[in-house]
Amino acid sequence: MNKKSVKDVDLKGKRVFCRVDFNVPMKDGEVTDETRIRAALPTIQYLTDHGAKVILASHLGRPKGQVVEELRLTPVAKRLSALLGKEVKKADEAYGDAVKEMIATMSEGNVLLLENVRFYAGEEKNDPELAKAFANLADLYVNDAFGAAHRAHASTEGIAQHLPAVSGLLMEKELDVLGKALSNPERPFTAIIGGAKVKDKIGVIDNLLEKVDNLIIGGGLAYTFVKANGHEIGKSLLEEDKIELAQSFMKKAKEKGVNFYMPVDAVIASDFAIDAESKVVAIEDIPSDWQALDIGPKTAEIYSDVIQNSKLVIWNGPMGVFEWDKFAGGTRAVAEALAEANDTYSVIGGGDSAAAVEKFHLGDRMSHISTGGGASLEFMEGKALPGVVALNDK
Ligand SMILES: Nc1ncnc2c1ncn2[C@@H]1O[C@H](COP(=O)(O)OP(=O)(O)OP(=O)(O)O)[C@@H](O)[C@H]1O
Ligand SMILES: O=C(O)[C@H](O)COP(=O)(O)O
């Protein structure tokens, strides 16, 4: 990476404003998945080990510029404190005199967590005044929030205009893995794209078709492609206005010599319901009042074979409604094939695919699980990430 990192700067005695992505799932005031907190630990530890005073900032949820009590970061401070094995002070604001006073009492190696930066309307507007107020708290800015790097907000982009700005270790690792995969892939290189909507994956499919050897399509978005191929899909998800686009992707794949894989069978359901009646049919046999909620077993077998024969696989988006057991088989089969493919470097592109891999307890069998959903998608689309662009060059 051509951006400076924490390893390139002097940290001793410095007040470091470190943006992390602690946008974690919570229930009843408890953190229910601490993956993102754990992922930030190496940077926090590196900073404290090198004598910095660490001021952490994050967003949580989408409070839209207002204080929302359930979206305070207090439970996160508690979890972080336990994981670090040291006290983490928590401020009830994210800037201002009270926060400055807390920082003034900090010693080298201390950690302070600021309040949810999205409680301020200026955060998402990238208000220069708010960015300056954040910058006023510190001597150095570290961005370790890969998951929020696609947002040009005051704490991810604006602040970098006012302080020396470097990346954290997680940010560096994410950019390294995803960057290498896209620029210098080991081959055969396979991308698996699933999820609900074609509309959300247009950019990524388009960009990956320039790079991959195999493109595998699954999930709800597959049925627009099946329809574009001339089959009836009953009540399965369809984006009518994307049929032509789907056809153009299939044409592009042919022109580029990319093997394009679509479902050959499906698990169909009588309704969109957890307890719906279900059965397996060939892809051309979906009855008009049924809907496809998962890829079928033959498809799963074909996809697993392609995975086993790949050197690099990038996966974004589930193959079916994996939240419901009846329709989780396809997503599970893909996750298991990746887990078993020892010679295959597997990159899971955050969001729902990461959640699925964790649900099947296969997380530790993947080579890299990105902490960024939207961010990894935008990166794979080939877009520049504002939170990265703003950092100082090496
Ligand atoms: N055949 C299907 N019909 C309807 N819904 C489906 C189907 N297959 C998958 N889904 C649903 O799609 C959702 C995931 O799609 P979505 O595009 O939101 O996630 P994603 O691609 O992982 O994106 P992100 O990484 O941003 O979370 C899941 O909730 C899943 O139940
Ligand atoms: O969960 C995420 O993908 C990141 O934390 C970004 O959150 P956002 O989509 O609310 O900006």
Image (tube, rainbow, N blue to C red):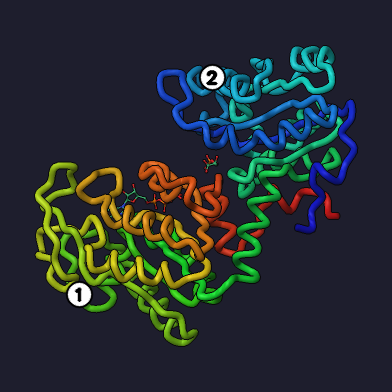
SS state under label 2: helix
- Residue 367: image x %, image y %? 54, 54
In the image, which disc is placed on residue 231? 1
Closer to the N terminus: mark 1 or mark 2? Answer: 2
Question: Does residue 123 sit above or below 394 in this rendering?
Answer: above
Residue 252 in picture, x, y percent from top left: 45, 81
The amino acid at mark 2 is Pro
Q: Which residue is mark 2?
A: 75
Seen from the viewer's position, the closer of residues 212 and 365 is 365
The quarter holding residue 355 reads top left
Near mark 2 (Cα within 10 A), the count class, few <14, some 14-19 or many ≥20, is some
Q: Name the side, left or right, on which 24 lies relative to 111.
A: left
Looking at the picture, tell me which residue is in the foreground, 217 or 381.
217
- Residue 9 vs 93, above or below: the answer is below
Picture layout, residue 26 above or below residue 225: above
**Left or right of 192: which side holds 208?**
right
Say few, some or many: other residues with alpha carbon within 10 Å of mark 1 (under 14 / 14 to 19 / 20 or more): some
Q: Residue at x 27, y 78 (%)?
A: 229
Which x, y percent locates residue 99? 75, 16
Q: Is residue 32 left or right of residue 161?
A: left
Residue type at tag 1: His
Q: Residue at x 67, y 29 (%)?
A: 57
Residues under labels 1 and 2: Cα distance? 50 Å
> What is the x, y in percent for residue 87?
68, 15
381 shown above or below 18: below
Q: Give the quarter of the figure containing the N terminus.
A: bottom right
Between marks 1 and 2 in the image, the one whose residue lies nearer the viewer: 2
Along the line of sight, the residue nearer the viewer: 192 or 200? 192
Element marked by disc 1: loop
Of the 4 image quadrants, the one containing the C terminus is bottom right
| Residue in the image at 67% along x and 50% along y | 173
